[in-house]
């Protein structure tokens, strides 16, 4: 701060590589897609894998976005985030099974209505659950990371056991709604319809979130709060209320992710949420804790890489994402889009 | 009796195990500029942070405009009409200048006449309106921070070292802005290390030492007495 201010225009001071580095995360996704294209011998397989990688990335993004904001805003690490995914999946799947006449009908419109009801039900349930989770489990441990990890993980275990109490210990198998089964052929590549729907929903969520964060006052408060919560309070906004809202929305999104993930796998277990958490953590970390854009880009990278590598070298698939995380953290230790922290 | 907008009586504030404020008494008369002076580390910033509620006084009371705000949460204090410009400026660097200002206008859209006035005081604001605040220079950030506090009329402004680390040309812009604000009848509690700025703006002066008020009087009195300055603040002749 004591350095004399530099008054020359920002752009003039930057070299080409510095200017490019702003777009580097986006360019990395394109690079991965191009590398995949070069490495995968058949173009139609490449297209199929790209779409499933994007679908997987979108679902991970939906789950991870709430977690990254919760961390950014209140410095809360929620290891129990997976619980909302599991509950969302079970509520959603139960609704789809209950709405057999809609989801089993060959009409796409009917199917979408069933899917919509399942999503709304799951999001409503997980939002209420998120509200209770925040009050009972998270609030008492503000500011204590170790306690947060322990107690939220404990919350996750309790919720998983409660799922077994209500739904039983067996896995639930289900069929996707009739019109969302199977695939369409595009340029010789088989594209699963459901994955296209998942990509569409993911894009809608991302654009919606971007709109709220960039164009509304609530969004301004959230973005400012991630950087400097104390100052937001000094302006007169009650950050705690905003945080509860974000936690609730993040839980609801995790519930939506749970429904999508459950339908994607066509089987749900109580551990479905916890199983996604490793990927979610990787995405949140490489994106930059607290950054929604970083989370989105990270999720797409993880989804694409996982699918490409699993096709080329199945044994390497498991470590490819960890490898990606190591590489990105060596390049940018705070994640791809680091969030400015005032403290 | 003098009409005080803010009165601190016997305020003690601890940060961790440190007793930073050890019984601060301070009066800020309405419509005046009250200077809070003293060496580094005597508790000036902690005093401001205690008033806005970032730190809690564990003893003593803070009365603002007839209300006891000692234990009030920060947002509630702010909404009573207290504008705060922290030492680190508290700029949201991920937000544009416009977004910083919009956020500061708590009660609704920014009043356009007021915005015009702010643009005339701080022309840089208009120039960089759509830019990310993080790309501004140090002086521009400081102007934004003060303009942000001024975007709506407040009863009291708490301003922490607005000229710290700034070039002389910018310091005079800053001083002019604060004088404008004062002429509009605002009450200001100002922490300032630059003595000539303090001398030009201040009505009354309060000097702190080791978490207490060691001297209070008029700014003119302090400015005229070099020996007093030397004793209270260790100011030497070069700082004039």
Image (cartoon, coloured by chain):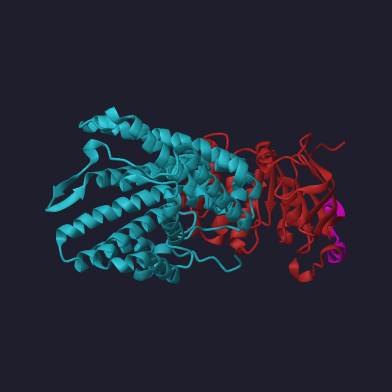
The residue most toward the left is: A188
Name the residue located 48 percent from the left edge and 59 percent from the top edge: B135
Left/right of residue A138 with respect to residue A186 in the rendered view: right
- Could you say where residue A28 lies in the image, as x and y percent from the top left? 32, 64
Report the magenta residues as a range: B215-231
Q: Nearer the viewer, residue A212 or B197?
A: A212
Q: Is residue A86 above or below residue A29?
A: above
Give residue B195's quadrant in the image: bottom right
- Could you say where residue B238 lies in the image, as x and y percent from the top left? 75, 71
Q: Is residue A314 above or below residue B184?
A: below
Name the residue located 43 percent from the left edge and 55 percent from the top edge: A280
Regarding residue A285, the answer to whether it shows in the image is yes
Which quadrant of the rendered structure holds the C terminus of chain A? bottom right
- Could you say where residue B218 lies in the image, as x and y percent from the top left? 83, 50
The residue most toward the top is: A101
Name the residue located 70 percent from the left edge and 48 percent from the top edge: B158
Q: Is residue B168 above or below residue B179?
A: below
**Which hue belongs to chain B?**
red
The magenta stretch spans residue B232:
no
- Could you say where residue B128 lies in the image, as x and y percent from the top left? 46, 52
Name the residue located 55 percent from the left edge and 56 percent from the top edge: B141
Regarding residue B130, the answer to whether it shows in the image is no
Q: Nearer the viewer, residue A163 or A144?
A: A163
The secondary structure making up most of the magenta span is: helix
The magenta stretch spans residue B217:
yes
Q: Is residue A265 above or below residue B240?
A: above
Which quadrant of the rendered structure holds the N terminus of chain A? bottom right
Left/right of residue A40 with respect to residue B66 in the rendered view: left
**Which hue belongs to chain A?**
cyan
Give residue A184's quadrant in the image: top left
Q: Nearer the viewer, residue B8 or B222?
A: B8
């Amino acid at each position: 701060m004591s350095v004399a201010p530099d008054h020359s225009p920002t752009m003039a001071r930057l070299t080409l590589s510095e200017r490019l580095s702003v777009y580097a995360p986006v360019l990395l996704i394109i690079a991965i897609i191009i590398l995949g294209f070069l490495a995968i011998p058949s173009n139609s397989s490449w297209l199929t894998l790209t779409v499933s990688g994007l679908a997987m990335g979108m679902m991970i993004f939906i789950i991870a976005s709430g977690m990254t904001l919760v961390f950014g805003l209140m410095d809360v690490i929620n290891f129990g985030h997976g619980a909302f995914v599991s509950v969302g999946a079970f509520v959603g799947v139960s609704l789809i099974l209950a709405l057999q006449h809609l989801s089993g009908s060959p009409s796409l419109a009917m199917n979408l209505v069933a899917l919509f009801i399942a999503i709304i039900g799951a999001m409503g349930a997980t939002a209420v659950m998120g509200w209770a989770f925040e009050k009972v489990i998270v609030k008492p441990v503000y500011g204590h990371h170790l306690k947060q990890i322990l107690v939220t993980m404990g919350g996750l275990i309790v919720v998983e056991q409660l799922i077994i109490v209500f739904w039983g210990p067996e896995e639930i198998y289900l069929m996707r709604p009739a019109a969302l089964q199977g695939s369409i052929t595009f340029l010789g590549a088989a594209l699963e319809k459901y994955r296209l729907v998942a990509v569409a929903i993911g894009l809608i969520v991302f654009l919606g979130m971007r709109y709220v964060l960039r164009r509304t006052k609530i969004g301004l408060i959230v973005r400012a709060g991630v950087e400097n919560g104390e100052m937001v309070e000094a302006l007169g906004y009650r950050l705690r209320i905003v945080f509860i809202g974000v936690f609730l929305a993040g839980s609801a999104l995790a519930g939506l992710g749970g429904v999508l993930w459950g339908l994607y796998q066509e089987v749900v277990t109580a551990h479905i949420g916890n199983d996604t958490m490793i990927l979610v953590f990787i995405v949140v970390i490489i994106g930059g804790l607290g950054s929604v854009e970083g989370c989105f880009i990270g999720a797409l990278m993880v989804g694409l890489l996982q699918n490409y590598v699993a096709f080329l070298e199945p044994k390497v698939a498991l470590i490819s994402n960890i490898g990606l995380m190591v590489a990105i953290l060596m390049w940018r230790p705070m994640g791809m889009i680091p969030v400015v922290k005032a403290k | 009796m003098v009409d005080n907008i803010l009165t601190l009586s016997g305020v003690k504030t601890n940060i961790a195990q440190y007793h930073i404020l050890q019984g601060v008494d301070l009066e800020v008369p309405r419509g005046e500029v009250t200077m809070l002076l003293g060496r580094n580390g005597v508790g000036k910033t902690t005093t401001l942070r205690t008033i806005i509620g970032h730190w809690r006084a564990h003893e003593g009371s803070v009365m603002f405009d007839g209300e006891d705000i000692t234990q009030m949460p920060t947002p509630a204090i702010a909404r009573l009409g207290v504008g705060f410009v922290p030492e680190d400026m508290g700029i949201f660097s991920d937000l544009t200048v416009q977004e910083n200002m919009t956020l500061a206008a708590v009660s609704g859209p920014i009043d356009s006449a007021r915005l015009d006035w702010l643009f005339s005081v701080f022309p840089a604001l208009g120039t960089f309106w759509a830019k990310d605040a993080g790309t501004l220079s140090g002086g521009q950030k400081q102007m934004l921070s003060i303009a942000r506090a001024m975007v709506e009329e407040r009863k009291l402004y708490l301003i922490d070292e607005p000229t710290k680390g700034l070039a002389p040309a910018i310091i005079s812009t800053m001083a002019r802005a604060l004088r404008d604000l004062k002429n509009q009848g605002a009450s200001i509690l100002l922490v300032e290390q630059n003595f000539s700025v303090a001398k030009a703006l201040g009505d009354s002066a309060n000097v702190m030492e080791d978490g207490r008020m060691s001297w209070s009087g008029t700014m003119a009195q302090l400015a005229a007495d070099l020996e007093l300055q030397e004793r209270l603040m260790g100011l030497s002749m070069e700082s004039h």
